């Protein structure tokens, strides 16, 4: 199976996954060069999920001879032995596979000889030096090309609208396979099965190519040369130098210089603006703290700061031995043992979402959440503060 390909997907200087950064802030690419990626449990879990998805799709929609079936079955067994595999992953990936199969059927309805490509290397070096990526799924039918990207994480929903990563995959897919069919429309789909999020952006091919020529190409040339202007923004979130980047610091310091006007008390309009600034500053402050912490851990001095031992809680080193002694002492069990049901997320992970709902769904409720103050752009409906009485302890700022 393609373990290395899944795990080593985005190591190119101008990778598709970092496109929002190098398009908006071209010098960021060279500035991060050589800084190692931080492997996380989430990334490793995502790698296993992608492998599982590939096996299931190969088994389901590609012709397999007995040798290929044996190979896939063996790979599947290996995945099932992986620590990240469980009912939650099985169900989420099965949902993803069903959606991909539906899209493939739609492509076949457009042209009976529609093609599906899995884990295809997509070359967009026509616009980006050394630019290539790996597409989870590419569907090509007469007139329409669709790329599908699986995102296994359940952090934030990712939209396909205006998403440069999936646009680059679409460009690469079109560039490599345009001789197969005449394409006039590209569809770009992001599927996040654990968030029930399916986002599809549709674009005429001409528009995609115009974006590549006028936005991608010039930014990529600057980024490759290590030139262009630094520009801070939302794209800084995944930048490896976000904690010590001067351009980002200057941008945030400008925000701090917010001019307060008379009279002594601020208006609600001013408060609204400051809340946005505060959010941005909080995120930045956390990144600077993380950077300083890493520096201190590596033995680098950050003037005015030092590493100390944090608070810790007492622990029982051998719980079985302690339980045996407490039991032998004749104490009532309630005095030392608490048996409690696991949380719903953990139960779903171990038992599976659908299975858990079938077993105890009647007892799972979602009580109304505490009121939170969020930007107007948030999708949730506004609460009516006149109909509902809130006490001050009920309030949270998200
Ligand atoms: S932190 Fe932001 S502004 Fe600084 S280099 Fe990275 S992307 Fe550019």
Image (cartoon, rainbow, N blue to C red):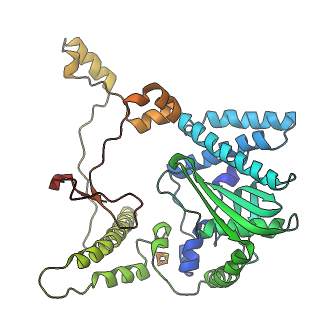
Q: How many numbered tags mark residues here?
A: 0
Q: Please, is residue 2 above or below residue 263 in the view? A: above
> Of 3 and 301, which appears nearest the observer?
3
Q: In the image, what residue occupies the spot 27% across and 35% down? A: 315
x, y (%) of residue 266?
A: 17, 79
> Of 380 and 155, which appears nearest the observer?
380
Q: In the image, what residue occupies the spot 64% across and 68% down? A: 15
x, y (%) of residue 68?
A: 83, 38
Q: In the image, what residue occupies the spot 78% across and 54% down? A: 107
Q: The C terminus is located in which quarter?
A: bottom left
| Residue 143, quarter of the rendered image | bottom right
Left or right of 300 on screen, residue 128 = right
Is residue 298 something one can see in this rendering?
yes
x, y (%) of residue 227?
A: 58, 87
Q: The N terminus is located in which quarter?
A: top right
> Of 25 and 360, which appears nearest the observer?
360
> Of 51 and 161, which appears nearest the observer?
161
- In the displayed image of the protein, which residue is found farthest to the left? 264
Q: In the image, what residue occupies the spot 46% across and 72% down? A: 234
């Amino acid at each position: 199976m393609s373990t290395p390909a899944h795990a080593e997907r985005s190591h190119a200087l101008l990778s598709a996954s970092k496109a929002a950064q190098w398009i908006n802030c071209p010098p960021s690419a060279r500035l991060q060069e050589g800084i190692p990626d931080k492997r996380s449990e989430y990334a490793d879990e995502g790698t296993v999920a992608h492998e599982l998805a590939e096996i299931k799709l190969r088994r389901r929609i590609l012709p397999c001879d007995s040798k290929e079936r044996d190979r896939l079955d063996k790979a599947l067994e290996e995945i099932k032995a992986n620590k990240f595999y469980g009912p939650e992953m099985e169900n989420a990936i099965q949902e993803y596979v069903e959606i991909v199969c539906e899209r493939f059927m739609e492509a076949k309805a457009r042209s009976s000889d529609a093609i599906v490509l899995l884990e295809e290397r997509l070359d967009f070096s026509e616009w980006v030096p050394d630019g290539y990526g790996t597409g989870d799924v590419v569907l090509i039918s007469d007139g329409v090309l669709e790329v599908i990207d699986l995102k296994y994480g359940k952090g934030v929903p990712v939209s396909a609208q205006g998403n440069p990563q999936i646009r680059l995959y679409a460009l690469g897919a079109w560039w490599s396979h345009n001789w197969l069919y005449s394409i006039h429309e590209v569809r770009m789909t992001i599927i996040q099965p654990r968030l029930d999020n399916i986002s599809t952006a549709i674009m005429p091919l001409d528009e995609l190519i115009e974006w590549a020529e006028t936005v991608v190409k010039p930014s990529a040339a600057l980024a490759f040369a290590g030139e262009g202007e630094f520009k801070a923004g939302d794209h800084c979130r995944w930048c490896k130098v976000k904690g010590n980047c001067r351009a980002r610091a200057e941008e945030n310091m400008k925000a701090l210089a917010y001019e307060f006007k008379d009279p002594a008390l601020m208006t609600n309009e001013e408060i609204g603006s400051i809340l946005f600034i505060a959010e941005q500053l909080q995120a930045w402050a956390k990144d600077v703290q993380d950077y300083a912490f890493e520096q201190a851990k590596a033995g680098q001095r950050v003037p005015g700061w030092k590493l100390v031992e944090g608070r810790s809680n007492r622990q029982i080193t051998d719980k079985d031995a302690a339980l045996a002694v407490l039991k032998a002492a004749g104490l009532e069990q309630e005095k030392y043992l608490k048996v409690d049901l696991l949380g719903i997320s953990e139960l779903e992970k171990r038992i599976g979402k659908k299975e858990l709902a079938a077993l105890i769904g009647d007892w799972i409720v979602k009580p109304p959440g505490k009121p939170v103050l969020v930007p107007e752009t948030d999708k949730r409906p506004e609460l009516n503060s006149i109909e509902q009485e809130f006490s001050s302890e009920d309030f949270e700022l998200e």
